[in-house]
Structures are given as C-alpha cells and as structure tokens.
C-alpha cells in the first residue's frame, strides 16, 4: 500500500487538529527556551549522534553501534547535569503565560520613581550598581549569598548602598514589592558571548539572573555610567531616568526596537 493510500485511510477530525496544535506550541516553547544558549549547540550535537547511530545501524557497523549505544545509555545522566541551568530556567518559566503576566505588572509608582531617581544619581557619577526586581519567580535562593534586609525602597538608601567602598556596594540589591530584602547578593553569570567589550561582570550577572528567572535587573556601568535593563536574557542599553521609570511601570516587550539581543556562542 502506497503512502497516498495510507493517507486516504486516515480520517482526521477536530481532535487531531487540536492535538497537533498543542504539540506544535509545546515544541515551539521548548525551542524558544533553548534558543541562544549553549544547550542549543549541544542539542545539535546530540541530533548528529542519533543520525550517526541510525546510519551505523542501517549499515550494520557493529562496533560503532555498540559504542554509540553505551554513550546514549549513560548520556541521559550526563545530560541532567549538563543541562541543569537550562532545565531550571524551563521549569521556572512554566505557567508564565501572557494572561497571567497581565495581572503581575509592577504598578507601584513610588517604587519606580525611587529606583529611577537612584539610578539617575548613580549614572551621573558613574557609580556601578545592580538592582534585581523580583516578580513571579522567587529570588530567595540568591538572598543567602548576601545580607538580608527589610527596608522600604528609597532613592537615598539605594544610592547609599552602592557608594564606593561601602560593604555592600559590589553585590546586587534585591527588591520585593516595595521592600529591599537583600544587598550584596551574588547573581549567576551568563555564559553568553558579549559582543560589546564594555559590558562587564554586572551585565553578565544581570543577564544570568534573567535567563533563569523572570526578574527585571537594572545595571549602571562603572566605566561609562550607562543605565541598562535585562529582562528574559535580553539587554536594553542607554536608558534615561525617564525611560527607566516608564519601563518599570509596564513590562518591557522583547520586540521593542530598543532591545538589543546579546550574541551567543
């Protein structure tokens, strides 16, 4: 029976169309999570190994088939370790559908004003700073690396924390709602290759955190005084104080013309 005869036997209905759409959407979301990360290149390598195994099996190359079989057997355990950051990011992003995001915008105008004012002061004096704003995904794990705090967000306090030579100026400030809950916190560094050599450790930390969580991270460059914002693993640069205030009162779109994607290896 030819393939066309097989197709004539099939009787697809609306349930099949729904299943195909759901599977296609799930695969698309998975591809988006891995796109632009080191996992994408490693997945290509795995696909090539699978193709090589199929060819070896078809040509009855016993030794190659056996060796690749051993690799696949133990490779599953290795993949869990190698892909751990990407898997954690994928789990963290589950449930973050557009409908749920509508109800979790940062609406506190006073907090936005205080953060924008503080960043403006720090930028004018080229004082390095990094501020992480918690959203749906908790940043509690990162508080353990710094000093816990319980202080209402204010421009004066933020500017004081990042004063050079202060004990907490090197780490990140974490904000939850209208409260500073931690300072001097260490954030995970992104493994992406940065095309702009002026971007330093703070920018890597900002990207690293937003690759694993849905946090917004604001950075002031110590070298240039430029304000940047990281969200979803994408960096927006050269922001003004007014633009920061605007972005903090609504979720920045990844399709915005101001978003400059970081080139990855």
Image: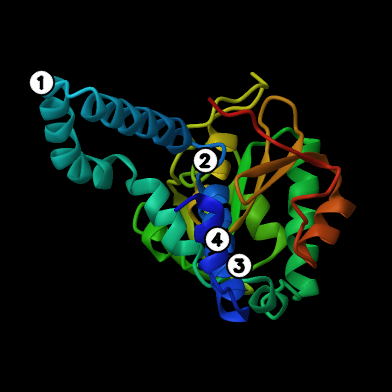
Give the mark toward the camera: 4 or 1.
4
Residue 62, x across and y down, in percent: 11, 23
The one of 8 and 71 positioned closer to us in this rendering: 8
The reply to whether residue 180 is visible in this rendering is no
Q: Which mark is residue 7?
A: 4
Look at mark 3 in the image and give the residue it sits on: 21
* Quadrant in which residue 105 is drawn: bottom right
Look at mark 2 in the image and give the residue it sits on: 205
* Quadrant in which residue 123 is drawn: top right
Residue 129, x across and y down, in percent: 62, 42
Give the mark toward the camera: 3 or 4.
4
Measure the C-alpha gap from mark 2 to mark 1: 45 Å
Is mark 2 in CB contact (under 8 Å) with mark 3?
Answer: no
Measure the C-alpha gap from mark 3 to mark 4: 19 Å
Position above or below: 196 against 4? above
Look at mark 1 in the image and give the residue it sits on: 63
Residue 238, x across and y down, in percent: 81, 37
């Amino acid at each position: 029976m030819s393939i066309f005869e097989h197709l004539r036997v099939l009787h697809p209905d609306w349930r099949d169309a729904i299943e195909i759409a759901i599977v296609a959407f799930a695969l698309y979301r998975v591809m988006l999570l891995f796109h632009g990360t080191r996992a994408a290149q490693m997945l290509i390598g795995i696909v090539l190994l699978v193709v090589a195994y199929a060819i070896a099996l078809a040509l009855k190359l016993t030794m190659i088939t056996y060796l690749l079989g051993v690799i696949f057997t133990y490779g599953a355990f290795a993949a869990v370790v190698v892909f751990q950051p990407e898997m954690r990011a994928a789990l963290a992003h589950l449930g973050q559908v557009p409908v749920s995001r509508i109800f979790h915008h940062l609406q506190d105008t006073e907090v936005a004003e205080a953060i924008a004012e503080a960043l403006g002061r720090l930028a004018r004096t080229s004082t390095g700073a990094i501020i992480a704003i918690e959203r749906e995904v908790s940043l509690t794990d990162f508080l353990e690396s710094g000093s816990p705090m319980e202080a209402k967000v204010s421009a004066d306090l933020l500017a004081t924390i990042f004063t050079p030579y202060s004990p907490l100026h090197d780490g990140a400030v974490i904000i939850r709602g209208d409260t500073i809950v931690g300072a001097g916190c260490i954030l995970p560094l992104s493994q992406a290759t940065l095309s702009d050599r002026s971007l330093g450790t703070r920018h890597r930390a900002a990207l690293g955190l937003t690759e694993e969580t849905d946090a917004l991270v604001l950075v002031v460059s110590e070298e240039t005084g430029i304000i940047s914002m990281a969200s979803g693993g994408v960096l927006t640069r050269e922001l003004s104080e007014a633009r920061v205030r605007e972005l903090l009162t609504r979720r920045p779109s990844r399709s915005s013309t101001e978003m400059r994607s970081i080139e990855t290896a």
